[in-house]
């Protein structure tokens, strides 16, 4: 029998219970706050933004599954258990969702939709003639699970795709690969549409400041669907005002919800979405969690295990 301690605020837990039990009817699903006693025997935590110090109280937890691909909601807990494996979400539903969001956003920026929507509001028939996709250079910051699937989905449109990661990758057909801080400026200089798909770590926080944003060619667009800590928002607003940057699509912010009085809300060339680029889907996530519990029970390493030293 597998015991799962589930934590998710503000949303019903029923669909999660149903999804897990549909695959394994023997699962014992315990919904927070009814987690029972830590002495009840081994359990797996499956959580999103748990209250700080909560996990530390349960010495029976054998592994912690993050309900999302990001783990910053866990690593900011000062009492996060140190010797318990933490597994990031990596199910197919999340990848499909992100590939859709990135493709939609790249197409919108390539085809000038932010400017066209602003013109519509002014009843302005002014036309925008888009370049051929092959002349549009898309650059993806982060070439992990979500960066790779997004790049693969963009290629058939003909975009000139590049990706940047921390470590060197094996060559991929049709994708120009960059890695390490030393190549970042060159990567940015060749990018018309920048897509942020990086985790939030001490190295990525504030990476896209005014100096880095200014390395993008004049008129470039930025899409951020990774974490809000990547972009220094005041610098972004300044470069959007100055016209150096053409437009932005932002799904994630340093503070969420984005404060009502933030300058970004008032900009015509900015599309704001409320952190919905890729939402974990119960059916595929349940399959992923139960598959990885089996791996751990067999003494194997789970997929997408957090490396605390890297921070992702
Ligand atoms: P992942 O598989 O761990 O990939 C992370 C990528 O970022 C890797 O390519 C990694 O490089 C690169 N990276 C990390 N630190 C770097 C650095 N300092 N310099 C250069 N590259 C660096 O993660 P994922 O599953 O693709 O998810 C990425 C992020 O998306 C998540 O952490 C989460 O924050 C965000 N997310 C957002 C949403 C949403 O709805 N907006 C949904 C899901 C996920 P290496 O390949 O060399 O390790
Ligand atoms: C969502 O933001 C995630 O990390 O999956």
Image (tube, rainbow, N blue to C red):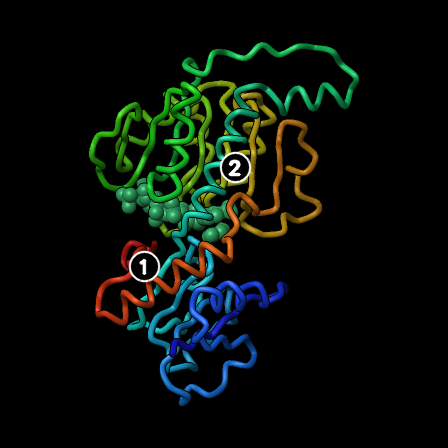
Residue position marked by numbered label 1 in the rendering: 306
The x, y position of residue 73, in whole percent, is 47, 61
Residue at image point 37% right, 82% down = 59
Pointer 2 and pointer 1: residues touching (CB < 8 Å)?
no
Q: Is mark 2 within 8 Å of ligand 1?
A: yes
Residue neighbourhood size for the residue with mark 2, other residues' Cα within 10 Å, grouped as few (<14), some (14–19), many (≥20): some
Question: In this rendering, is residue 225 above or below 39?
Answer: above
Q: Which residue is mark 2?
A: 101
Q: Secondary structure at mark 2?
A: helix
CA separation in Å, label 2 and label 1: 25 Å
User: Split into 4 quadrants, where in the image is the C terminus?
Assistant: bottom left
Can residue 135 be seen from the camera position used here?
Answer: yes
Query: Is residue 177 rendered to the left or right of residue 50?
Result: left
Residue 261 point in image, percent of width and height: 70, 45
Quarter of the figure with the N terminus: bottom left
Q: Is residue 309 above or below residue 195?
A: below
Label of residue 219 in the image: none
Residue 204 visible in the snapshot = no
Name which quarter of the figure residue 239 lies in. top right
Q: Of tags 2 and 1, which is closer to the observer?
A: 2
User: Dot 1, crowdedness within 10 Å: few (<14), some or many (≥20)?
Assistant: some
Q: In the rendered image of this protein, does residue 30 appear above or below residue 243?
A: below
| Quarter-of-image position of residue 240 | top right
Q: Nearer the viewer, residue 162 or 145?
A: 145
Left or right: 125 with respect to 76? Answer: right
Residue 171: x %, y % from top left: 21, 30
Q: How many marks?
A: 2
Q: Residue at x 33, y 31 (%)?
A: 163
Under circle 1, the secondary element is loop
Residue 176 screen position, x and y as percent: 29, 25
Who comes first in sequence, dot 2 or dot 1?
Answer: 2
């Amino acid at each position: 029998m597998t015991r799962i301690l589930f934590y998710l605020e503000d949303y019903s837990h029923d669909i999660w219970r149903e999804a897990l039990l549909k695959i394994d009817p023997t699962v014992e699903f315990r919904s927070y706050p009814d987690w029972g006693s830590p002495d009840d025997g081994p359990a797996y935590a499956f959580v999103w933004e748990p209250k700080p110090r909560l996990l530390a109280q349960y010495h029976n937890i054998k592994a912690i599954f993050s309900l999302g691909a990001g783990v910053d909601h866990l690593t900011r807990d000062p009492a996060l258990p140190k010797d318990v494996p933490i597994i990031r979400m990596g199910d197919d539903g999340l990848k499909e969702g992100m590939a859709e969001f990135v493709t939609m956003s790249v197409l919108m920026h390539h085809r000038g939709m932010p400017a066209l929507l602003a013109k519509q509001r002014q009843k302005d028939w002014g036309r925008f003639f888009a370049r051929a996709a092959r002349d549009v250079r898309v650059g993806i910051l982060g070439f992990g699970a979500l960066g790779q699937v997004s790049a693969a989905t963009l290629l058939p449109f003909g975009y000139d795709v590049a990706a940047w990661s921390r470590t060197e990758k094996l060559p991929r057909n049709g994708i120009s690969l960059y890695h390490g801080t030393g190549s970042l400026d060159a990567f940015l200089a060749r990018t018309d549409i920048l897509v942020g798909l990086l985790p939030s770590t001490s190295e990525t926080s504030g990476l896209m400041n005014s100096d880095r944003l200014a390395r993008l060619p004049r008129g470039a667009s930025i899409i951020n669907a990774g974490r809000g800590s990547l972009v220094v928002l005041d610098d972004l607003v300044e470069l959007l005002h100055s016209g150096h940057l053409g437009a932005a699509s932002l799904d994630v912010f340093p503070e969420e919800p984005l404060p009502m009085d933030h300058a970004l809300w008032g900009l015509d060339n900015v599309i704001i979405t409320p952190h919905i680029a890729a939402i974990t889907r119960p059916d595929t996530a349940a399959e992923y969690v139960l598959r990885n519990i089996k791996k751990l029970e067999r003494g194997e390493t789970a997929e997408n295990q957090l490396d605390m030293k890297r921070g992702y």
